[in-house]
Image: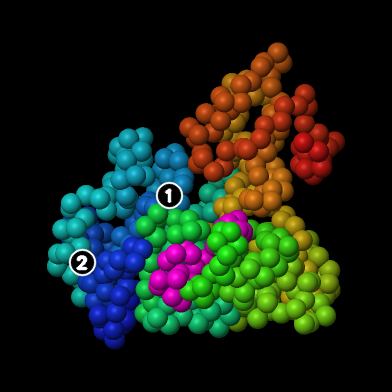
Amino acid sequence: MNVAEWLYARALIAPDSPALMTGEAVDADYAAFAARAGSLAAALSGRYGIGSGDRVAIFMRNRSDYLEALFGVLWLGATVVPINAKLAPKEAQFIVADSQARLVLVSDDVGAPLAAAYPSIPMLSADDPAWAAMRAGASMPRPAPREGGDVAWLFYTSGTTGRPKGVMLTHANIVAASLCYTADVDTPGPGDAALYAAPISHGAGLYSFINVRAGARHVVPESGGFDADEILDLARSLRDVTFFAAPTMVRRLVECARRRGEDGDGIRTVIYGGGPMYLADIEEAVRVMGPRFVQIYGQGESPMTITALSRALIADRGHPRWRERLASVGTAQGCVEIRLVGPDDAPVATGEVGEIAVRGPQVMAGYWRNPEASAETLRGGWLHTGDLGRLDADGFLTLTDRSKDVIISGGSNIYPREVEEALLLHGEVREVSVVGMPDPEWGEEVVAFVVPKTGAAIDTAALDRVCLDNIARFKRPKRYVFMGELPKNNYGKVLKTELRKLEL
């Protein structure tokens, strides 16, 4: 089944219900939302020759047009390739090329730099008058038929090698993940306001499908992103607001609510994940705002769907082990089977640390054009997450470490190899190693340990510049530490564990 059928069905059932909003202003009801998606699908097919299975990238900041573009691509039966709007042109270009995207749908603010750097990439801007004409034109009356195993969403996530990999999520994967949401996270309804404060290109966008199915309002803040005061104001007006937030966003929201003397009135559910949430922070969040929080743990390969910690468990203070449970990431979601394995892939005993492996209908089909990585990650029929944890006797999963060196800062994944390769482009850098250090605001901050070439004096501003020229701004190191040598083992491998122990 094509998941765009959910929009088609909702438009038939409740055509006049508000669907797309910017702030408190309604941009489209469900009839208009579906008509625009169908018209964009017809134009993509007729004008650009896009067909079923073709890839179409979306490189936009949050706006209601994003959802029109997303469902328009799927309506046609094509595969959407969402690109993080924070990425540098060089990074976006790689994704466009690797996915073999036929077209990139952009907004001018991020599309213009990409077009300037790579003028040969075919683009269409939502700010172009042609866009408005296309979405008002003849419509493809119904979504194209697709099989459950057809790829709907091609999401790029980097690995420890630094080379981004395309995670193939099928229509069936998205249906399974969406139904997990209703069973284990929240129960959406037509009165809800699904707020897009986090990037639509990531988990917030994946939650759009179940909210379309439920007939909720889809609200993009006027700021286009996260502003705590704006969200608190909107919640009081819109009511029944739900949204996904990284832990750093939760902390800012709670601080703002406390400063204003409010409790988040109008917010029903804040789903948090994507990085470590300190125990003290979630305790404070519940004290200030009450039982409005649900935690999820997942990754691109099993999107938002590995475990969940319910609002009741987060708010519970009566259980004798409530603190341990609150420090966990919850229990397996309904469509997921979890086991922890050792280096030989044999299950470990309850309470012992092992690599988290999962299987179920929500797990990706594999990595795009990367059979070796697919076979390694999906060996034995289980998704090997690369994360380490332990399961208690009641099924609560606690993360203990990441076997990969990924840094999670403000809910965004940052891969050290990418940053290291950028810094090595500076002619005076001999060696560099990048690690994540604990940060109370962002979860982790990026720290680069730099060994200059003999006799070289390196300007940190120049290091910043080489990063900004090659990678996204949010990946740039917050601190540089200059060293004569990096700590290494007998085989010459840099000991990042030793770097993390240093007191800076």
Residue depicted at 69% across the width and 22% down the height: 452
- Looking at the rendered image, the quarter that the N terminus falls into is bottom left
Residue depicted at 81% across the width and 35% down the height: 488
Query: As drawn, is 2 to the left or to the right of 437?
Result: left
Query: As drawn, is 23 to the left or to the right of 149?
Result: left
Give, as a single range, the part of the protein colored magenta: 231-255
SS of the residue under disc 1: loop
Q: What residue sits right under mark 1 in the picture? A: 85
Find out whether residue 247 is within the magenta segment. Answer: yes
Image x and y of residue 168, in percent: 48, 63
Image x and y of residue 86, in percent: 46, 47
Hey, which quadrant is residue 34 in on the image?
Answer: bottom left
Find out whether residue 347 is within the magenta segment. Answer: no
Residue depicted at 69% across the width and 62% down the height: 281
Kind of residue sitting beneath label 2? Ser
Characterize the local packing of mark 1: few (<14), some (14-19) or many (20 or more) Cα atoms within 10 angstroms.
many
Q: Can residue 214 be seen in this view?
A: no
Is 214 located above or below residue 449 in the figure?
below
SS of the residue under disc 2: helix
Kind of residue sitting beneath label 1? Ala
Q: Can residue 123 be seen in this view?
A: yes
Q: Is the magenta stretch mostly helix, strand or loop?
A: helix
Image x and y of residue 500, in percent: 77, 43
Q: What residue sits right under mark 2 in the picture? A: 39
Query: As drawn, is 387 to the left or to the right of 151?
Result: right
- Looking at the rendered image, the quarter that the C terminus falls into is top right
